[in-house]
Amino acid sequence: MYLGAIEAGGTKFVCAVGDASGKILATERIATETPEITMEKVIKFFMNFKIEALGIATFGPVDLDPESGTYGTITSTPKQGWANYPLLKTMKKKLSLPVGITTDVNGAALGELYRGAGKGLNGCLYLTVGTGIGGGAISEGHVLQGMSHPEMGHILLRRHPNDQEFEGICPYHKDCLEGLASGPALQARWGKPARALPSDHSAWEIEADYLAQALMQYVLIVSPKRIILGGGVMKQAQLFPLIREKLRLYLNNYVAFPELNADIDAYVVPPALGDNAGITGALILAKQSLVK
Ligand code: ADP
Ligand code: ZN
């Protein structure tokens, strides 16, 4: 049985065909241009295979309320042509198949939970720290969902003592987590791309502080079984021990589980699937959409 998967991003759509075991048999990368141009190529790719269902992990914001008339529609993106684009409806109509849709980070959480760094658990939280910051959580096998999907990147934090001047770059909130700690925020604060900052630069201590504050709040509110930190900025591996240490200090044993103390190295972890987390999750979503 063949299943289809799309990881829809701001720069590219990764399309894949795989089987029910998660094995990927074919992939194609298609540039994100206007929906007309991109979606024609996406549909053409899937027409080459006899897939039985499709899963989509997409950039957002996207309407994920199944009761809504615009379920599966991209909502308020600045990306040219994509605001109000009915992604789910279009794919259902063109392929006449069951199609599941979720956010890119929910997709990555699903992929990591079932086939990556969360294997053996029934829940986890996945946070990407890249061009933007976003998180998805799975609890007891269910993707956390309310009015729509969570927006974990836009929470407010306490300022680091050595970071009082930088305004923050979030167009909505200025110094929310994304405004202070995303890749473009690092670039704006330090005047060079994040990847060009040496690993012993003071940037990373501040970065780890903000991420640890965020993780503290996720721990307190969602109580995730494991936290997986992905995205371009997290390629700075020195961040992991700093974040774990600061998370412990911030929690101060208020939640005194081994996961948050002696076993914290196994609690805050990098993705095991690397850049394939999202597409792997989309494939899982395709399979799940068959049984619904
Ligand atoms: P996106 O979020 O656009 O899907 P990424 O997760 O790759 O893509 O994030 C891109 C951001 O991550 C950019 O702001 C870039 O500067 C930053 N980045 C990429 N690689 C590194 C690295 N090795 N170290 C620090 N920052 C990086
Ligand atoms: Zn914000």
Image: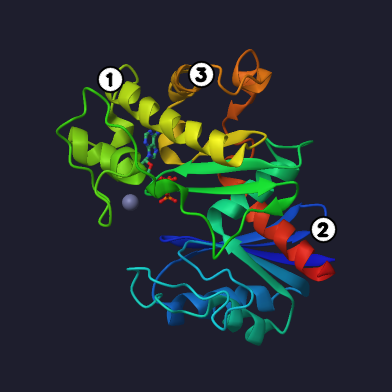
Q: Secondary structure at mark 1?
A: loop
Label ID, residue 106: none
Percent of width and height locating residue 38: 47, 75
State yes or no: discs 1 and 3 in contact (Cβ < 8 Å).
no
How far apart marks 2 and 1 lie (CA) works out to 45 Å
Vertical placement of residue 248 versus 159, above or below: above
Residue that appears at 37% across and 26% down: 209
Percent of width and height locating residue 281: 67, 53
Task: Check disc 1: other Cα within 10 Å, few if <14, some if 14-19, many if 20+.
Answer: few
Label ID, residue 201: 1
Position of 210 with respect to 240 (left or right) is left
Task: Check disc 3: other Cα within 10 Å, few if <14, some if 14-19, many if 20+.
Answer: some
Residue, disc 3: 248
Q: Which three-letter amino acid code belongs to the residue tagged 2?
A: Ala
Vertical placement of residue 210 versus 198, above or below: below
Question: Does any atom of ligand 1 lie closer than 8 Å to the CB of label 1?
Answer: no
Q: Quadrant of residue 163?
A: top left
Whichever of labels 2 and 1 marks the residue nearer the N terminus, that label is 2
Q: Which three-letter amino acid code belongs to the residue tagged 3?
A: Arg
Whichever of labels 3 and 2 marks the residue nearer the N terminus, that label is 2
The residue positioned farthest toward the front in the image shown: 254
Q: Which three-letter amino acid code belongs to the residue tagged 1?
A: His
- Taking depth in this image into account, of 250 and 207 the one nearest to the observer is 250
The residue positioned farthest toward the top in the image shown: 262
Residue that appears at 60% across and 82% down: 89
Colour logic:
rainbow
- Taking depth in this image into account, of 278 and 69 the one nearest to the observer is 69
Residue, disc 2: 20
Whichever of labels 1 and 3 marks the residue nearer the N terminus, that label is 1
Q: Secondary structure at mark 2?
A: loop
